[in-house]
Image (cartoon, grey):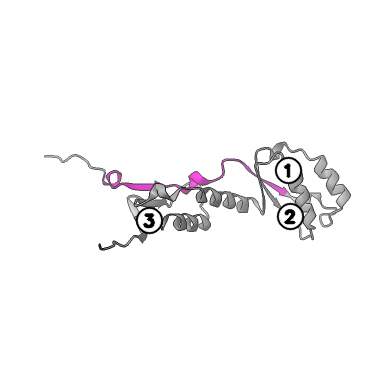
Amino acid sequence: MDKPFVNKVAESGIITIDLENYFPKAPVVLFDLKDYLFMGLILKEKEFRQNLQQLNKESYTSAIVAVTCSADAIIPMWAYMLVVSALQPVAQEIILGNTQTATTKILIENIQKIDPLEFADKRVVIKGCGDTPIPEEAYLEITKKLRPVVKSVMYGEPCSTVPVFKKEKTTP
């Protein structure tokens, strides 16, 4: 007599968290100050202000803007402030750094918004494989967020996990 197939993973009560779901939904666009420097090295205030006023803001609308300077130039602090002043009315967010830095920052912010109590006394697997590379900071942040409340944290897939943390049983 054949026994019915039992999906032990589905019955285990394990909750899987896919960190890909916490990546920014808005596009991340680079604003490189290098493109506004005279000879690629010198920031001239009058021309810089004019260029910002004439800037086509369409590509920055509702985007996460990563502000950087890829040239080896000295950029005065007020120049970054002027960029924010020009882009803040249209951009969703403005972050100092490259697109990877901005993406990681938003990813971490999204993880920090998770209500850990949703996972209280649960067994949680942080998905390990996917289409998008997940930065190490995200794994650190999700572990810090969940460890105080969950029964266990694992890494990988529900059918093949690496134990990370297991709450010790307390005796009455």
Who is closer to the viewer here, 94 or 56? 94
Query: Mark 2 or mark 1, which is nearer the start of the sequence?
Result: 2
What residue is disc 1 on?
A: 87
Q: Which is in the foreground here, disc 2 or disc 3?
A: 3
- Decide which of 22, 41 is in the foreground and name it: 22
Name the quadrant of the C terminus.
bottom left
Quarter in which the N terminus is drawn: top left
The count of marks equals 3
The x, y position of residue 152, in whole percent, is 35, 56
Crowdedness near tag 2: few (<14), some (14–19) or many (≥20) residues, C-alpha within 10 Å: many
The residue furthest front is 172
| Residue at the (62%, 51%) spot, across then down | 102
Q: What's the mark number on residue 100? A: none
Q: Tell me, yes or no, whether the highlighted magenta stretch contains residue 2.
A: no
Residue beneath disc 3: 154
Q: Residue at x 51, y 58 (%)?
A: 136
Identity, as a three-letter code, of the amino acid under mark 2: Cys
Disc on the earlier residue, 2 or 3: 2
Q: Which residues are magenta?
A: 8-31
